[in-house]
Amino acid sequence: MTDGTPDTAAPDTAIVPSPCISVCKLTADRAYCIGCLRTLEEIRGWKHMDADQKRALLADLENRQAAAAE
């Protein structure tokens, strides 16, 4: 029986928020979205990723953002 609280022992079932910030515009070369920095493949695949895959992508996006700022 569960009390309704999230199960922190099961990270694959945790909700990982989307990086979308509703600025949906691709770069001129259509390489990635200027709002969230995801590629089209990553945007399409988000709903099929498990929580670990989403967290890994979020980490990649942080690296992309840091590289773009240089």
Image: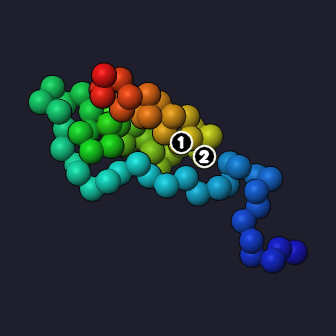
Q: In which quarter of the image is the C terminus?
A: top left
| Dot 1: element | helix
- Which residue sits at x=17%, y=33%? 27
- Eyeballing the image, is 53 above or below 47? above
Task: Answer with left or right where residue 62 lies relative to residue 12.
Answer: left
| Outermost residue, right side | 1
Q: Residues within 10 Å of mark 1 (few under 14, many from 20)?
A: many
Residue 69, image x, y percentages: 30, 28
| Dot 2: element | helix
> What amino acid is at disc 2?
Ala
Task: Answer with left or right where residue 25 lies relative to residue 57.
Answer: left
Q: How many marks?
A: 2
| Outermost residue, left side | 28
- Which residue sits at x=53%, y=42%? 54
> What amino acid is at disc 1?
Lys
| Outermost residue, front side | 70
Q: Do the residues labelled 1 and 2 touch (CB within 8 Å)?
A: yes
- Which residue sits at x=49%, y=55%? 17
Q: Residues within 10 Å of mark 2 (few under 14, many from 20)?
A: some
Asked where in the image residue 34 lies, by quadrant, the reply is: top left
Q: Which mark is drawn over residue 54?
A: 1
Asked where in the image residue 21 lies, by quadrant, the reply is: bottom left
Residue 15, image x, y percentages: 58, 57
- Eyeballing the image, is 70 above or below 36? above
Q: Which mark is drawn over residue 51?
A: 2
Task: Answer with left or right where residue 40 lies relative to residue 16.
Answer: left
- Which residue sits at x=32%, y=37%? 37
Asked if one can make out residue 57 in the rendered structure from this viewpoint, the answer is no
Gap in angstroms between the C-alphas marked 1 and 2? 5 Å
Asked if one can make out residue 22 in the rendered structure from this viewpoint, the answer is yes
Q: Which mark is drawn over residue 37?
A: none
- Eyeballing the image, is 6 above or below 12? below
